[in-house]
Image: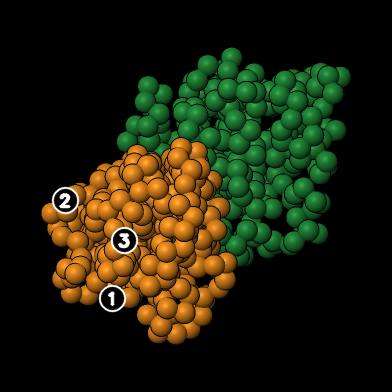
Amino acid sequence: METSDLKIISADVRKDIIKMLSLAGTGHPGGSLSSVELLVSLYFKHMKFNLKDANDQNRDYFILSKGHVCPVLYAVLARRGYFNPDELCTLRKTGSRLQGHPAKDKELPGIEISTGSLGYGLSIGAGIAAGMKQSKKNNRVYVLMGDGEQQEGSIWEAAMSAAHFKFDNLCAIVDDNGLQIDGTTKDVMNVYPLADKYRAFGWNVIEIDGHNLEAVDKAYLQFKTEKGSPTAIIAKTVKGKGVSYMENLVEWHGKIPSKELVERALAEIDGSLR
Amino acid sequence: MVEVFGKKATRFGFGEGIIELGKENPKIFVLGADTISSVVIDGFKKIFPDRFINVGIAETNLIGMAAGLAVAGFIPFVSTYGVFASGRPWEHIRTTVCYSNLNVKIGGSHSGIMVGPDGATHQALEDIAIMRCLPRMKVIVPCDLVETKKAVVASAYSDGPVYIRYGRENIPVFTKDDAPFEVGKANILRDGNDVAIISCGTMVYESLMSAEILEKKGIKARVINIHTVKPIDEKTIIDAARECGAVVTAEEHQVYGGFGSAVAEVLVKNYPIPVEMVGVADRFGESGEPMDLMSRFGLRDVNIADAVLKVLKRK
């Protein structure tokens, strides 16, 4: 798929996110918007899966460690064909399969495990990677985390083990938008330098602009060629990317725009394609 | 007299169980956290090194990697000391394992006051309470080595998360290989209609001994082994209440929220009768010789017999 096509899909996913959250009335736009290109490239270009059987033994695995940005995952899954996009409007509603944070037991195709409590995805990914190694299978495992989430100690337990066991089939992606609920990640509890930390833990590290689809594509390609150590893609991103009044503002972590602002956001996203 | 076939710690039953499973099922995977020889999972490692992972001193990652292996289609067993297997990664067990209904089996070794000299930090006295409150979690507390092995094997084929609680110290082996074991089904070990002593784990043997003491006083106690604390065998408990009219529960665990509470929940809803609970009375453990501690904390056969006399007065 061409970069120009991925760009259009990314814009559509951004609009889905805004519309879903507007209908839900609650949720997390900022971090959803910062992860768009990382997920669109992954699902439309890099991951192996079987739409007829989401549990196909030969699939690659994706774990959304930062579970609160599930609107972006739901939108990407729906647009990729895992389920009917009409279902997106049920986000966070009673009885919906699209829970406020991903829920395995609601059996939404593409959701591998329940997440939402931060800091757990990388160890889950390491476990899947261990299973694939033991079975001598070449399925790959992708885990998307946030930068604030790097404050959780459990991430570093997992980081240590993934390098120790040489899980080169594991790719950690950090959506480094630099903000968390209480302020900038630097001010609240400085996690930087992230790349150096992962390198010191024995990881292969790739630093990119997480909104540059060509750079994202190259990073995933490089991961697939790495041998002997896990890969961390540290993707510098903008929280609220694509909606000017949200960009880099911490208050849009978990706030829903008014109807008027929704229209403005949708128009801006459309405008970005011209 | 209660027939005893030697003394051996239940942790060896766990070790034997996982090896038996490993031989019959290639999906069995075992994970440890730097305590692998003391929780007796090193034997599995020797035979099946490619299905064994030691995560080091990192219990949260222990649970997370087990969860990942379950997602990948394996049946992972993890084991370390009960305090650290249940309490340290509790919310990971809740949100990742139980909420996702994953096939993860958690072995809580070194449970109870009988851990002895290591003292309170290492004596798991709350694990039944914090595991049984989790939706989808099954909780099994076997009474001896033979039953522990059966519990391990059965848990592999019981879908979803299971917590198995067992111990470090040598205790009497008094059940036989051919004794029935079914997850969720209690075993009546001794008949009697004056009182029902309902217990789990190490306290089952103490309960049988207390029944001997009581018999000399002319009291016929029914002794029920509830190895599966959750889902609990309500029918056997209700039948015992109806036929005996009084119940004493016994556990090597805090009485608040633990096994006695689980039995009481069944009784108050279905057949309220006088109940006394033998267990640790809202306090931390301490260092000492295992059986000394059992006496010091009121967890011996004589304490159960005293509780029976007390409950009978309320009948």
Colour chain B appears in: orange
Report which residue position mark 2 lands on.
B24
Element class at badge 1: loop
Q: Callout 1, which amino acid? A: Asn
Report which residue position mark 1 lands on.
B170
Q: Chain of mark 3?
A: B
**Label 2 near label 1: C-beta < 8 Å?**
no
Q: Dividing the picture into quarters, in which one does residue B233 lie?
A: top left
Whether residue B185 is visible: yes
How far separated are the C-alphas under marks 2 and 3? Answer: 46 Å
Asked whether B203 or A211 is in front, the reply is: B203
Percent of width and height locating residue A198: 57, 62
Element class at badge 2: helix
Q: Callout 3, which amino acid? A: Ile
**Closer to us: mark 2 or mark 3?**
3
Indicate whether A198 appears above or below B70.
Answer: below
Q: According to the colouring, which chain is green?
A: A
Residue B219's disc number = 3
Q: Are marks 1 and 2 on the same chain?
A: yes
Q: Earlier in the sequence, mark 1 or mark 2?
A: 2
**Label 1 near label 3: C-beta < 8 Å?**
no
Q: Is residue B16 left or right of residue B203?
A: left
Q: Callout 2, which amino acid? A: Glu
Q: Dividing the picture into quarters, in which one does residue B239 lie?
A: top left
